[in-house]
Amino acid sequence: MNTETFDSVFWISFITIVSGMILKLASMCQKSKCKECVMCGGRIRIIRDTEAEQKEAESELTAKALGNTAE
């Protein structure tokens, strides 16, 4: 394998991995229950919305309780 082929394969792999990591971080921020999510501009500051998490947990518990009583 010559140097040009190695360099191009390396950079393609590197860019793909970095892009994947950035997209995964963005999807994690999108799925999380955050009020505010600032990345590198604010040196990565994330504020969680615990009220939304509590409401979701309560709705899951009530749905499970209703599902169990219906059977």
Image (cartoon, rainbow, N blue to C red):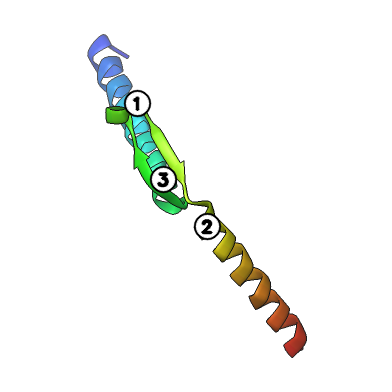
Name which residue lies at 40% across and 39% down: 25
Label 3 sits on residue: 29
Asked whether the residues under the numbered discs 1 and 3 touch, taking CB atoms below 8 Å apart as contact, a structural biologist would say no
Disc 3 marks which amino acid?
Cys
Are there few (<14), some (14-19), or many (20+) residues within 10 Å of tag 2? few
Q: Position of residue 68 (x, y in %)?
A: 75, 81
Image position of 71 with respect to 44: above or below: below
Image quarter of residue 56: bottom right
Residue in the image at 44% along x and 53% along y: 31
In the depicted view, which residue is nearer to us: 17 or 10? Answer: 17
Name the foreground residue: 31 vs 7. Answer: 31
Classify mark 1: helix, strand or loop.
Answer: loop
Q: Earlier in the sequence, mark 3 or mark 2?
A: 3
Q: Which circle, 3 or 2, is nearer the viewer?
A: 2
Q: Residue furthest front?
A: 51
Q: Count residues near mark 1 (Cα–Cα under 10 Å), then give few for <14, some for 14-19, many for 20+.
A: few
Between residues 49 and 21, which one lies in front from this camera angle?
Answer: 49
Q: Residue furthest top?
A: 3
The amino acid type of the residue labelled 2 equals Glu
In terms of sequence position, does the residue under pointer 1 or pointer 2 come before the other? 1
Instruction: Say which element carries label 2.
Output: helix
Left or right position of 52 against 62: left
Residue at mark 1 to residue at mark 3: CA–CA distance = 15 Å
**Residue where numbered disc 2 is placed:** 51
- Mark 3 lies on a secondary structure that is helix
Q: Can the viewer see residue 25?
A: yes
Could you tell me if residue 23 is visible in this image?
no
**Image quarter hosting the N terminus:** top left
| Residue receiving disc 1 | 43
